[in-house]
Amino acid sequence: MDRQELTDLTRGQPFVVERVRLTDSGVAVEGQFEPPQLAQPGIDDQVFVAAFLRSHGSIKEMERIFGVSYPTIKSRLKRIAEHLDFVDTDPAPTGAADVVDTGSDAGRSAPRRRLPSWRSPGDPAVGDGTPSPS
């Protein structure tokens, strides 16, 4: 069954995949799996997202491909994005050492940012007054 047939069959209703088989090895896994988020929108929205990615996010190129205006492209992207859950790739800080004060602006505290996730938990935070290791 191809993607279009599945989309026609489900008519946009939620569904669960219960068996996945790797074609090269024949290994099958059974359980309940939700399809990936980008497989859940209708086929028209999937084509739109694929075109957006292939155009490297160029709204001008999307205008040319679909023959519609900038606001129409932006509106459709916003509508699609509202249905996607975004993964937090840099979770909230877990302790004071995970946060760095980035300075102040006219007496107001500037936003605090998360240190890169590759920093080891035992490493001192930059700018926290802790001497760097010798």
Image: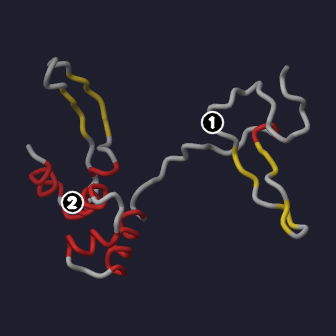
Question: Where's residue 15, x and y in %?
Answer: 26, 48
The residue pinned by badge 1 equals: 117
Residue at x 25%, y 24% (from the top left corner): 29
Question: Where's residue 18, x and y in %?
Answer: 24, 34
Toward the viewer: 69 or 22? 69
Looking at the rendered structure, the kind of residue marked 1 is Ser
Which quadrant of the figure contains the N terminus?
top left
The residue pinned by badge 2 equals: 47
Relative to 29, say whether 96 is above or below: below
Relative to 63, say whether 104 is above or below: above
Toward the viewer: 92 or 27? 92
Residue at x 31%, y 51% (from the top left corner): 38
Q: Earlier in the sequence, mark 1 or mark 2?
A: 2
Residue at x 30%, y 82% (from the top left corner): 69
Which quadrant of the figure contains the C terminus?
top right
Tag count: 2
Give the CA separation, mark 1 to mark 2. Answer: 33 Å
